[in-house]
Image (cartoon, rainbow, N blue to C red):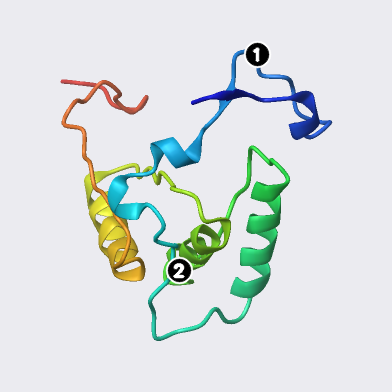
């Protein structure tokens, strides 16, 4: 991390985050990815509402939006859409999943979409958080 975020880089409706820093992406990119652009490899092209979603999400990231939601039913192409957003913004991306099964599924899909880039997978084996409804017996 290097440069302090300036007020000019922050949307007017967002609070100032004192001490926040902007990443120096060149020094943080893994050597195997240096100079390798993110390129989605797929037999399919975005269709239906996907191109508009890709445009809107990309624009939001470029405008510094801190919160965006991509909502869709199972099988609607949310992961494919996000892969295209990653390709457009050309930045390393962290994807969090709520469970090991979904994490493995996302890893497999992203690895197939980005075969020329490093796609990593990590599952924590610590269980610090239990659902509020969980009552041990």
Looking at the image, tell me whether mark 1 or mark 2 is earlier in sequence order. 1
Tell me residue 92's x, y (percent).
44, 48
Tell me residue 45's x, y (percent).
51, 82
Q: CA distance from mark 1 to mark 2?
A: 35 Å
**Residue drawn at point x = 64 percent, y = 57 percent:** 58
* Element marked by disc 1: loop
Tell me if 117 is positioned left or right of 121 in this view. right
**Residue drawn at point x = 70 percent, y = 55 percent:** 59
Q: Disc 1 or disc 2, which is closer to the eye?
A: 1
How packed mark 2 is, by other alpha carbons closer than 10 Å (few <14, some 14-19, many 20 or more), is many
Q: Residue furthest top?
A: 18
- Asked which quadrant contains residue 48, the reply is bottom right
Tell me residue 117's x, y (percent).
32, 60
Q: Nearer the viewer, residue 6 or 135?
A: 6
**Residue drawn at point x = 47 percent, y = 70 percent:** 77
Relative height, residue 54 to residue 92 (above, below): below
- Asked which quadrant contains residue 110, the reply is bottom left
Q: Which residue is mark 2?
A: 80
**Residue drawn at point x = 34 percent, y = 53 percent:** 33
Q: Residue furthest bottom?
A: 43
Q: Nearer the viewer, residue 137 or 99?
A: 99
Relative height, residue 28 to residue 85 (above, below): above
Q: Quadrant of the C terminus?
A: top left
Relative height, residue 103 to residue 54 (above, below): above
Marker disc for residue 38: none
**Total marks drawn?**
2
Q: Which residue is mark 1?
A: 18
């Amino acid at each position: 991390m290097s440069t302090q975020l300036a007020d000019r880089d922050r949307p007017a409706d967002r609070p100032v985050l004192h001490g926040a820093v902007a990443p120096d992406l060149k020094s943080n990119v893994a050597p195997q990815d240096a100079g390798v652009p993110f390129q989605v490899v797929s037999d399919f092209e975005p269709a239906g509402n996907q191109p508009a979603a890709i445009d809107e999400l990309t624009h939001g990231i470029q405008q510094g939006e801190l919160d965006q939601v991509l909502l869709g039913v199972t099988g609607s192409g949310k992961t494919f859409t996000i892969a295209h957003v990653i390709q457009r913004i050309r930045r390393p991306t962290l994807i969090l999943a709520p469970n090991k099964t979904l994490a493995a599924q996302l890893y497999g899909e992203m690895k197939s979409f980005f075969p020329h880039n490093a796609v990593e997978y990590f599952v924590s084996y610590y269980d610090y958080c239990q659902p509020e409804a969980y009552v041990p017996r």
